[in-house]
Amino acid sequence: PHDRGAHMQIIDLSQDIYEGMKVYPGHLKTVQFEHVTHEETAPRFEGGFSFQTTGFILNDNGPTHVDSFSHLDPAEGAETIDQMPLELFYGPAVCLDVTSFAPQTDITADDLNRIEAESPVEVQRGDIVLFHTGTWNKFAGDKRYLTDFAGLGASAAEWIVERGVKTFGVDSPTPDNPASKSYPVHMMCRREHITHYENLANLDKVVNTRFTFAGFPLKVIGAHGGPNRAVALVE
C-alpha cells in the first residue's frame, strides 16, 4: 500500500468557494467575512500567540455538492444528507466527454452509447460516472455558467439507471438541460434514489480515465445537500 500511494495522483475536482461565486438561481448566495484578526486576538494571550478566522454562509446546494434524497424526493422518510450511506460518495469512477453538445439541448442515451464506445473507458455496474460538459472550464465566474450548457435528457436519465450507475455528477449547476421545465434527470433521481454531484471542476483532467472518486459531504443534520471537497485519485 505504501508503494501504491507513492504513485497516486490527487486531482482536485472542486470549485473555489468565495463571495460572488455563481450558484444555481434562487439558491442562497455565498457570503464570506472576516470574523477575527490576529490584531484582535493577540491581546488575549501572552508570549505572542494570536489567531484569525473567517466566517462563511453557504447554501447546502451551493458550491461543489452532492444532493440528498430529501432534496430530490418530498416523500416522508427520504434521507437527508447526514442519513445517506458514505459508500455513495466514494468508489471506482469514470468520466465521459459530453462537451460537443450545443447549450440548452438534450444529450440522449444514444449519444452516451456512442461516446462510451469511442472512449477508452467502459462504464461498469456500480461505477460513479462523471460527465464533462466543459461548463466550468469555459464559464467559471461568468453568468453564462448558469445557462450555457447542455443537459442529460430523459433517455440519458434512464441510461444511468439501466447501466447500474451508483452516483453521477456534472461540472455544471444541474445535470438537466437548463431550458427544461420538467427536469427528467432529477425526477429519475427521485424515483430511483440515485444521487448526483453538481458544480464539479477540472473534469478535463480525468476525462476518458478510470479513477477512484471521493466526495464526502459535510455532515449537516437535516440538510438537503452536502458541500464537499471532491477529488479524483488516479493511479
Image (tube, grey):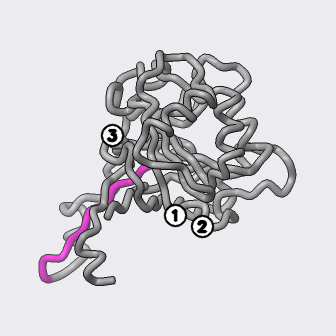
**Amino acid type of the residue tagged 2 in the rendering:** Glu
**Residue carrying label 1:** 91
Of 140 and 102, nearer the camera is 102
Q: Is residue 141 visible?
A: no
Magenta segment: 47-56
Q: Is residue 187 left or right of residue 6?
A: right
Q: Quadrant of the C terminus?
A: bottom left
Q: Secondary structure at mark 2?
A: helix
* Numbered mark located on residue 87 in the image: 2
Looking at marks 3 and 2 on the same chain, the residue that comes earlier in the sequence is marked by 2
**Amino acid type of the residue tagged 1 in the rendering:** Gly
Q: Is residue 76 left or right of residue 107?
A: right
Identified at 61% across, 17% down, the residue is 179
**Residue carrying label 3:** 204
Q: Is residue 199 left or right of residue 4?
A: right
**Amino acid type of the residue tagged 3 in the rendering:** Asp
Query: Real-space Cα distance between discs 3 and 2?
Result: 25 Å
Q: Where is residue 137 shown, x and y percent of the image?
A: 32, 32
